[in-house]
Image (cartoon, helix red, strand yellow):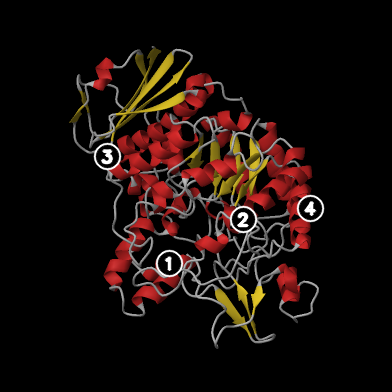
């Protein structure tokens, strides 16, 4: 392997969901000053990049992903002076800052949309996607990502506007060059302010090419917009323009929330660097669902065979052609130890460390979601009122209120996979509200904070936190972890996820027991070298203990 070196390939990224990270003024909502307060914690962990989810002014119909001012700070999060102080503190500690770019849609409170909906001849009308109805209904049969139609009727002008998410998130019309000018000017403004990159929200949807009816899945209520609005040639053209007009002028990390297939991932993140540095793939999350008309809502687990097939396909498919991002959890997914591992008191720590080993030794830039480094778990809420997420409440209306799904079944699905599982406040210590706030938290704190919190873990050499710290240190030490080839091992093993990395004669062998049982694994002794890291101090010959992870470093 002779891949071109780049700082963003060698970095480890830590994602902060600011609403849930640290509150400093007692209003129950995390803020930018809270991030600044915890920078030494992150520096001690060893991460290189901090990605902060949206902190812009927003009416919060979708927790900040409905932005009403792209150059401001939501008052709940602080002021621009607070942002500048945070940015300075990050840079002062040798870390970098990535911010969210949410430009597939705006809030319906954004001044552009307020003007756009006033009249058909308003100068801002074409900033959004307006269409006449069809036979007394919406322009086509598309469903939104959050249930219901993707079209909202507006009485003022007797037309519908497109919203691929909530009605409060109207889609921008990227076909209008003025829209692209505005977006690129805004991006340049933030770059000149000193930020170090963008995580681009649903960026694979910006290039709409037609408005034809989509296929309706069996038992579904609406058609899919995928063929018309996802991964289109138009999207790639817009991204190349973005690259030429903004991105190439700075030394940035760019990661697109795009999903799609391996082939589509290569288009976005090709090593020719014409579009983005990397994308987030979704298959190892979304691809594990049952594929029923309920979409993501199911009891489907995370069998090793399925996870391995998907992740290995991305590892092998992109290496040498494009750059990977590797992760298991974020603000849109449940806690990884609850979904992929085992969050019982007996196995949580071992399991969390095993999953971390699996990801951090792979090819690609690893992403840590806040609290993951502590082994935080799902919240397991028992009442619908415990959930704040619009996706949950819309799903309840669509499937339960209509009588199509039993309430107990849907609550079980929510407990397994709802996004609020990852959005409960960060667990800092064992004081009330886990040290997150002195007020009433916007979302209930997970009740297990007395047993799982940062104060305990930072000082415990055997904690999940300190295991992550060591994984990050190793990545910064050994080039084979960053630039080595990827070779799957034991592909038919039902219990062990194994692979090796090779670079200039150095061999890294990774063995991860995916189960709560002791299982045979002769490869442990057969692999060259000595143990580099493991979540067990004592090992047994020829086997891997429950959720055991072993990494060996040697020579070919």
According to the image, label 2 marks what residue? 25
Pointer 2 with pointer 4, Cβ within 8 A: no
In the image, 172: left or right of 222?
right
Q: Mark 1 or mark 3: which comes first in sequence? A: 3
Q: Quadrant of residue 507?
A: top left
What residue is shown at x 22% (from left), y 38% (from top)? 516
Image spot of residue 381 (x, y percent): 35, 61
Residue at point 64%, 77% (across, down) = 131
- The disc label shown at residue 185, or none: 4
Residue in view at x 70 percent, y 32 percent? 92
**Which residue lies under the disc numbered 3?**
347
Residue count near mark 2 (Cα–Cα under 10 Å), binned few <14, some 14–19, many ≥20: some
Residue 440 vs residue 543, the one in the foreground: 543
Residue under the point 63% across and 59% down: 207
How far apart in space, not on screen, are marks 2 and 4 (Cα)? Answer: 33 Å
Marks 3 & 4, CB-CB < 8 Å contact: no
- For label 4, the SS is helix
**Regarding mark 3 in the picture, which secondary structure is present there?**
loop
């Amino acid at each position: 392997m002779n891949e071109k070196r780049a700082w963003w390939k060698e970095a480890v990224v830590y994602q902060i969901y600011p609403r849930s990270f640290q509150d400093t003024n007692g209003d129950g909502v995390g803020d930018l000053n809270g991030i600044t307060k915890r920078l030494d914690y992150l520096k001690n962990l060893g991460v290189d990049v901090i990605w902060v989810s949206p902190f812009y002014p927003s009416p919060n119909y979708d927790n900040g992903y409905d932005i009403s001012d792209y150059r401001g700070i939501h008052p709940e999060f602080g002021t621009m002076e607070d942002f500048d102080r945070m940015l300075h503190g990050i840079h002062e500690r040798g870390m970098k800052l990535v911010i969210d770019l949410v430009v597939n849609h705006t809030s319906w409170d954004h001044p552009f949309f307020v003007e756009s909906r006033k009249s058909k001849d308003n100068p801002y009308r074409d900033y959004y996607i307006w269409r006449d109805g069809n036979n007394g209904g919406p322009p086509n049969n598309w469903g939104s990502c959050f249930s219901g139609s993707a079209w909202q009727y507006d009485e003022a002008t007797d037309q519908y506007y497109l919203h691929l998410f909530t009605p409060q998130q109207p889609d921008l019309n990227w076909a209008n060059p003025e829209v692209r000018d505005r977006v690129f000017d805004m991006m340049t403004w933030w770059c000149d302010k000193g930020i170090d990159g963008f995580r681009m929200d649903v960026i694979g949807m910006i290039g709409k090419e037609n408005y034809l009816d989509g296929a309706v899945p069996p038992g579904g209520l609406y058609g899919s917009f995928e063929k018309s609005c996802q991964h289109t040639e138009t999207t790639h053209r817009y991204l190349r323009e973005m690259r030429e007009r903004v991105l190439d002028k700075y030394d940035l990390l760019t990661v697109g929330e795009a999903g799609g297939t391996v082939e589509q991932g290569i288009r976005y993140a090709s090593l020719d660097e014409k579009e983005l540095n990397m994308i987030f793939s979704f298959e190892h999350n979304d691809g594990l669902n049952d594929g029923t008309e309920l979409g993501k809502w199911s009891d489907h687990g995370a069998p090793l065979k399925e996870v391995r097939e998907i992740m290995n396909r991305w590892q092998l498919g992109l290496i040498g052609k494009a750059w990977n991002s590797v992760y298991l959890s974020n603000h849109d997914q449940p806690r990884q130890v609850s979904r992929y591992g085992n969050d019982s008191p007996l196995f949580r720590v071992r399991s969390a460390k095993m999953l971390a080993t699996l990801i951090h030794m792979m090819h690609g830039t690893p992403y840590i979601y806040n609290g993951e480094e502590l082994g935080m778990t799902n919240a397991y809420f028992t009442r619908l009122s415990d959930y704040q997420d619009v996706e949950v409440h819309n799903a309840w209306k669509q499937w339960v209120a209509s009588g199509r799904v039993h309430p107990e079944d849907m609550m079980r699905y929510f407990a397994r996979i709802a996004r609020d599982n990852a959005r409960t406040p960060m667990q800092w210590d064992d004081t009330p509200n886990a040290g997150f706030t002195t007020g009433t938290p916007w979302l209930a704190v997970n009740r297990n904070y007395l047993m799982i919190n940062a104060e305990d873990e930072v000082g415990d050499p055997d904690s999940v936190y300190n295991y992550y710290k060591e994984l990050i240190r190793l990545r910064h030490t050994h080039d084979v972890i960053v630039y080595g080839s990827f070779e799957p091992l034991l592909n038919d093993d039902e219990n062990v996820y194994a692979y090796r990395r090779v670079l200039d004669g150095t061999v890294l062998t990774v063995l991860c027991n995916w189960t709560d049982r002791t299982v045979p694994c002769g490869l442990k002794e057969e692999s060259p070298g000595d143990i580099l890291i493991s979540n067990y101090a004592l090992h047994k010959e020829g086997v891997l203990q429950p959720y055991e992870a072993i990494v060996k470093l040697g020579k070919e």
